[in-house]
Structures are given as structure tokens and as C-alpha cells.
Image (tube, grey):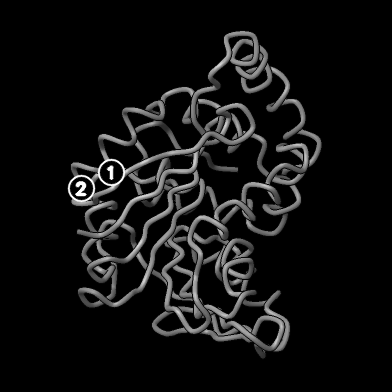
Amino acid sequence: MSRADLDKQPHDVARMFDGVADRYDLTNAVLSLGRDRTWRAATVRALDLAPGALVLDLAAGTGTSSRALAAPGALVVACDFSLGMLRVGRRRDVGGGPDTGVVGGTGRGRVGGRGQVSFVAGDGTRLPFADGSFDAATISFGLRNVADPEVALRELARVTRSGGRLVVCEFSRPVLTPLRVVYLEYLMRVLPELARRVSSNPEAYVYLAESIRAWPDQQRLGRLIRSAGWGDVAYRNLTGGIVALHRAVRR
């Protein structure tokens, strides 16, 4: 099975995620020790979406995060450049009908009779949407996988209306030294072993650990978001800083 390197060539990253799509959500739940649900819920609360709001969920994968966003009544566009992930998400979209393949169009499904999720193939550095299309935008655990995160953040700003909100949920740097030591040990030793037991492509999770270690800390990511055209940038640590929730507003 393939894995990406830290140069994050888009075709390598997309192929890697295509290969883990079928067991991706299960693997994430196991490797996060079930905390992924808590992080998704925090993202939904931070966006505070009104019913009918149109939100872009970039790097949405199989749409698990998108369904959580849609539950209160939002209209969510789940965008990803891994067609394998989108196809799995489309198949799981209860009531959404047969798999459309997602290429060149959208697949729509209702969520709990309230919100709606549409699946769209797209590259985060060249989003296929008009300026100011969305009321809000979010990306969870995906900005780290983009070849040029600042370009992706600028694209998110371009397609979000003035005053619209951004929430970036991403792995970060634990604030307490003992937790940081334990966490790094988990990343580099325990996580790869767990991945060998539950993932269809354990090497992909070696990349995951490497990419987390190389990722900017909370302050550096905040500066990057600000330089990409967002204002009122702030963050909140989750799980002791293992994950950080960055919030911003479109100027």
C-alpha cells in the first residue's frame, strides 16, 4: 500500500487516503481512543451554525464531520480530493441514493431530516467555488495534509463571505511537558503498532505521526491563519493541546 511523504505531493496524499477509505473512520476512533467524537462536537459548537447556513467542510473525507455539522440544520458541502474517501462517504449517506461516483458533480443526502450534505471533489489549493459562496468554512485534521497550507487558507477566505467564520481543528502541541512526552511516545511507538492491527494501510499512519510532529504549534498556526486574510484569530486547546481549535472571521 502507498503512503505519502512530508513533501505532500497531492497525488501521493490522495492515493494514500483512497487506500484507507473503507476503514478510515474505524481506525480514527481506535487511534484517538474515542476522542474524535469529542473533537467533532467541539468544532460544531465553535462554528455555531444557524439552520440553513451554507458551510464548506474541506478535507471532509467520508463525511463524518460533515454529518455532525449538518445535524443542527446546516447545508454542508463536503469537499475532498480523495475520490475513494468521497465514494465511501456517499455509500454511507443514508437516504442519499446510489453511489454517484462524485466526479463532476454532487451527491446529496439529508441528515436526520434537517441538514443536508453534498459531496464534491476538489483540491483545497484550487477550490471549485465562487468568491463568497459560504457562510462559514471548516477543515478538521486536513490542513496538515495540504502541500501549501497558506494557499488553502487563502482559498477558504476567498470562498467565505465577509464576516463568515472559520474553524480549523488540527493536531497540535500538548501544553504540559509530561503529556507531551507521553504523547510523542504514543505517536512514534504505540500508534504505528495499533495501526498495524486495525488499518488497511499501516504505513499511512506512520506518515500521520511524522506529519503531526512536523506541524506548527498553536501560535505559529494562528499567525499563518492571520496572514492568509482572516481576522479575530484565536484558539482553544482540546485534550491538553493534543488538538487545538482555531477560530477566525473573514475580514
Image spot of residue 235 (x, y percent): 43, 39
Circle 1/circle 2 CB separation < 8 Å: yes
Q: Nearer the viewer, residue 124 or 196?
A: 124
In this view, 163 is above or below 237? below
**Residue under the point 53% across and 81% down:** 51
Three-letter code, disc 1: Ile
Image spot of residue 150 (x, y percent): 24, 44
Describe residue 213's horizontal placement relative to residue 27 as left or right.
left
**Residue under the point 36% across and 73% down:** 135
In this view, 65 is above or below 207? below
Which SS class for mark 1? helix
Report the disc number at residue 228.
Answer: 2
Q: Quadrant of residue 117?
A: bottom right
In this view, 104 is above or below 139? below
Q: Nearer the viewer, residue 91 or 33?
A: 33
Quarter of the C terminus within the rendering:
bottom left
Q: Quadrant of residue 94?
A: bottom right
Q: Quadrant of residue 18?
A: bottom right
Which SS class for mark 2? loop
In this view, 43 is above or below 213? below
**Residue under the point 55% across and 54% down:** 43
Residue tagged by mark 1?
A: 225
Report the disc number at residue 217.
Answer: none
Three-letter code, disc 2: Ala
